[in-house]
Image: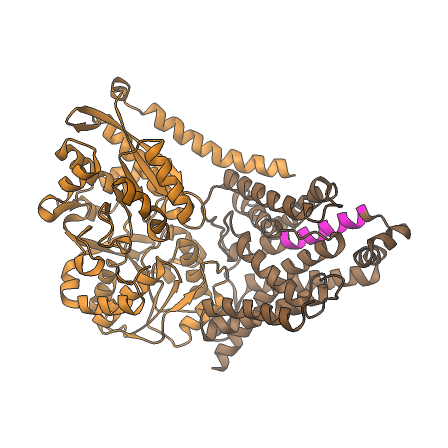
Chain colours: A brown, B orange
Amino acid sequence: MLDLLAQTGLNAVYAASYISLIAVGLVLIFGVMGVVNFAHGELYMAGAYAVVLLYTDFQIPFFLAVAVGMIFVGCLGLAMERALFRPLRDNPLGGLVASIGFLMILQSLAVMGFGVRMEHIPPVTQHVIEFSERVRLPLSRLFVIIAAVVLLSALWIFLKRTRFGWALRAAAQDPEAAALQGISINQTARIAMFIGAGLAGIAGALTAPLVSVNPHMGHSVIVTAFIVIIVGGVGSLEGAIVASVAYAFVHTFVTTFFDGVIADITGLSLMLLVLIVKPTGLFGSADRA
Amino acid sequence: MLSKIVKSGLTRRTFLQSTAAAAASSSLPRAALAVDKVIKIGFLAPLTGPVAAWGKPGLDGCEIWAERVNAAGGIKLGDGDYMVEFVGYDNEYDPAKARTGATKLIREDGVSFIMMLGGDTWPGVQPVADKTGMLFSTLLPSDLSPDTTTLIAPAEVHPIYNVTGVEWLAENKPELKTAVMCAQDDALGLPSVATYLAAFEAAGIEMLDDPLLFDPATTDFAPVVTKLISGNPDIVCLDTCYSDYVHPIAEQLFQQGYEGQIISCTADFYDQMIEKTSEEFLEGFVFQFPDFDDMALNAENINFEDPNGFYFEFNKRYPGQWGAVSWEYASIMDLWKAAAEKAGSAEPDAVIAAMKDGGTGKHAFGDASWWGEELFGIDNALVGDWPVVVIESGKARIKEFRNIPAWYDKHGDLLVKHMKAYDQMWDQRS
């Protein structure tokens, strides 16, 4: 039983890691730009396909492919900001609708470029850390956990300790006041989009060898990400991380001790419960809700 | 950056597709140009999305079939010879899109017969079938009911043939006593769960736990596998999971240290699974769909023409794409062609009457009977022998053909019991 609990705990830590990378990016974009980016799941998908192309097809070293994938998806975010979100900044629903359109474009490009079938990605490593006969952590999963801890810590330091980070937070709190203080709203939007998209990209790139990579893979992660940011509090980075960990542990343990369908129902019930008890989410404030 | 990557991706795939298309068109026989009468056949299946692996390779196989038939002079009906042409429609495994597709294929394209994967998409199409009287086929006989008089399941009696794998396993590896199972919670997964439960019970293999159902949107299978192997089962059964699930589950079983027996309905693209795990890990993996280069398919009782040549041609055109359904839709066309030629007509009523004449038919894996009254409420499934396939030294091999009705005669009550428990009998499905 102890082994089962430990293995389930390791599974949950991995799930919390990749979910938080995606959710934090989504929250950052919403917080700074006020845009609900429905294409965020497809940015995750784009990161995974970058690995398919670079690592599988061109046989570039995996971590180099992941880094290029993250930068590529970050640049994709910059392009979205400039071409879609900036022109529609004054239209409350414009960004949302544009992101849905962009989602379809990215899916279609993936279908045209790679076909509809699941992509095969050779394993990066088959090494497994064995804590006991029944408690194991594959190294490829550990990479995701380490990346999440490092990147989210770096983001935390960036937001709290750097001038760009302060500008970003100021723009998120009150864009007009920030602009009056000389902060460029366009620049903060660009930084937020690059970081937010890049986080989704690296989550897709790192997990690509572990999941089924196909043009529709973004659907399930975006649903999970929305549940997480609603529970955590829309616009709250801390909330996104705490809710990611909570959701991952609840979902993983319920899947293991009951089944996956009950786990999905439990996750949605958790969201409903939070909405009823604290409609702004665990860490949200009324003006962002 | 974007344009470079997209360009590279497009070039890679497009090059292969263009090459295949050029090869296909250059091999068109001169005879095809001399005949102007064409019979259109509808192909209404998922060509994109997570279930595409059970649609697209089937259409590819049908194109090869059509070229072979057209090269041999086409289909000979009462009023002359006809070339065959397939009209594909991607239903994305969505009932509403399937309904739109069926209407379009019948009204706009004028098809004479429509082949489907079935499952979740059939309820969307059934009203169209009822209204038009069009002849449809499904790969999933669980779509059949007394109301589906123009729906046939002539290629595979999914999931009933899964009993042959369990029966073979019990006879050849009697030391395996316990099993666990996981499945996606949908129209493909649940009847298969009931079938495997019946097969394990008939074989005296104990289920250690209830089948573990997961949402089809699941991407991380580590918790599912942790639960599955927590009781140290002798057998892990992957039910009729899609290949998008079989691969990551097998990889997780490998990574979490499972060393027992695996049985599954399918093992599409198993070479990729071997690369993700190891040849030793997948040794003895039991499933139900052979590669058609298997010499066992050259036996006299096999009704699929030149299976080895078909497999070679398929792999030449679509390298690495061979899967469970690559041959199935083509084998349905063999039956349809024989029936249409016998009837001298492509009219649905005439074809189905000719097809079911005498109560028997030539299934790809041998002569078979129209069957299913007890289970489906109608004898519209063509059932006979089915192969048990085992991965040995990294290659799928047919170990034996087993007779499905023979198993049902002995254990049919168990199957009905478990089908009822999962609301999968024809009179329980909504």
Quarter of the view holding residue B159: bottom left
Residue B354 location (% of width, % of height):
13, 40
Task: Establish if A183 lies above or below A140.
Answer: above
Residue B82 location (% of width, % of height):
23, 26
Quadrant containing the N terminus of chain B is top right
How many marks overall?
0
State the residue in front, B256 or B183.
B183
Residue A225 location (% of width, % of height):
61, 60
The majority secondary structure of the magenta stretch comes to: helix
Magenta stretch bounds:
A186-201
Residue B357 location (% of width, % of height):
11, 43
Viewed as shown, does residue A157 lie left or right of A182?
left
- Can residue A255 be spotted in the picture? yes
Q: Residue at x 48, y 66 (%)?
A: B222
Viewed as shown, does residue B385 lie left or right of B97?
left
- Can residue B403 be spotted in the picture? no
Which residue sits furthest right? A181
Q: Residue at x 35, y 35 (%)?
A: B105
Q: Residue at x 31, y 39 (%)?
A: B61
Which residue sits furthest front? B131
Residue A22 magenta-drawn? no
Q: Residue at x 24, y 52 (%)?
A: B147
State the residue in front, B10 or B358.
B358
